[in-house]
Image (spheres, grey):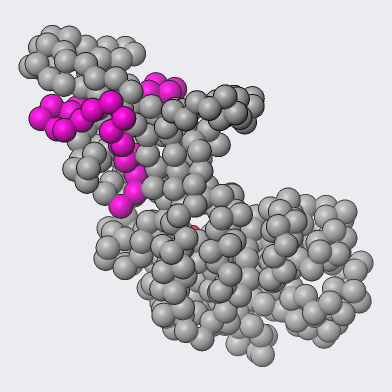
Amino acid sequence: MYEISFYICHSQGVTRVRQATVYIDSQALQYNLNRVKQLAPTAKIVSMIKANAYGHGVKDCLDALSETDAFGVAHLEEALEIRALGFQQPITLIEGVFSADEMAISIEQNIEIVVHHQIQLDWLNAHKDIYIAKGLKVWVKLNSGMNRLGFKFPEIINIINTLKADGFTCVLAMHFANADAENHPLNEQQKNQFLDVKEACDPIMASCCNSAAIFKWPELNFDFVRPGIMLYGASPFADKSVQDLDIKPVMTFTAEIIALNEIQAGESVGYGSTFVAEQAMNIAIVSIGYGDGYPRAFPKQNYVAINGQTTRVIGRVAMDMIAIDVTGLNARLGTIVELWGENRLVDDVAEANGTIGYELLCRMSNRPVRKKL
Ligand SMILES: *Cc1c(COP(=O)(O)O)cnc(C)c1O
């Protein structure tokens, strides 16, 4: 539907269409990948591009990430999309396969799997010879206290040693529950358990660092690091900005002013009339809403940027429109408004919205037009 109307607008020579645009900055993505290389110079990089590359669009990101060693995704369809686009790097399914059928397809397409459950070991063993012959690695997941996925200590030691004895090449894998927290006691427990298993299964390759851990614990980089959010230029930490971390926002999300209104003291704006002007002011209506992925429920004041200057969002966010305060600003019809990007960080929008940058990025709708820079 959307593509058809877009096509009609263009084929009939209409150049002005609704402006809601997501720009993807390939150079920023490459800059951030280089930051991973600086921080983890001896590890191979498994770039996490699950959830449509955290909402950035897999295809554009794959092109920009040609220097990565491998990719990580959450399920088989995401992996097959990478292969369909012609990329041959190793891919890891971070939750493994969900059925015996998926195991056969994965192997056929040279996709590596995590195993975190006995049934996945059974499916794997049914294809043992071909899996080994293709040189695919088995990522064996340790549950060291996050209690999502994984084999527990000490059972995992037997599982790994059996896989190794059977000829599999294994990677010990683990995920921190609190890598973004300064002094959480579970961090030490998870680290120590991981190191104990690694030692008991020596020699074995190892991988336990997401973005936060890459920044915090260089001593845990080991063989593979798994950066996600830092590649996209958002911060994994509540108390550290992208400037502190020296990474660059990859996505710029913009819309434009489609109407200007002057309102008087006592007049309200938008659904529910939740905003009432205390004095005369100029407001602008911007072509963006929750139908595009812009968050509606911010418990704290949210802001946008115009010409690099921030200004408040007022009243409720609607499906297709928001209102902003442009009193005293040089705002006209067609003026570009940055919802997030360099001047208004997605992390700050997320903070006003009681969530994290990850969520806002992942839940972008496909209504905005996407452009690669
Ligand atoms: C998503 C994910 C990552 C990346 O995490 P970030 O915090 O985005 O860097 C790493 N490892 C696993 C297993 C994941 O699921």
Q: Give x and y (percent) for residue 22.
A: 45, 43
Q: Is residue 356 magenta?
A: no
Residue 215 against residue 162 in the figure, above or below: above
Give the side of residue 199 with respect to residue 289, left or right: right
Q: Is residue 64 visible?
A: yes
Give the side of residue 197 with respect to residue 337, left or right: right
Give the side of residue 366 with respect to residue 343, left or right: right
Say which residue appears at 31% left-offset and 67% top-offset.
245
The quadrant in which residue 53 appears is: bottom right
Residue 254 against residue 162 in the figure, above or below: above
Which residue is more in the foreground, 328 or 124? 328
Q: Give x and y (percent) for residue 165.
A: 82, 85
Give the overall secondary structure of the magenta segment: loop
The quadrant in which residue 324 appears is: top left
Extreme residue in the bottom direction: 203
- The image quadrant where one finds the N terminus is top right
What's drawn in magenta, residue-wise?
Answer: 317-342
Extreme residue in the left direction: 279
Q: Give x and y (percent) for residue 328.
A: 10, 30
Residue 231 against residue 36 in the figure, above or below: above
Q: Give x and y (percent) for residue 302.
A: 26, 35
Which residue is more in the foreground, 358 or 146? 358
Q: Is residue 144 visible?
A: no
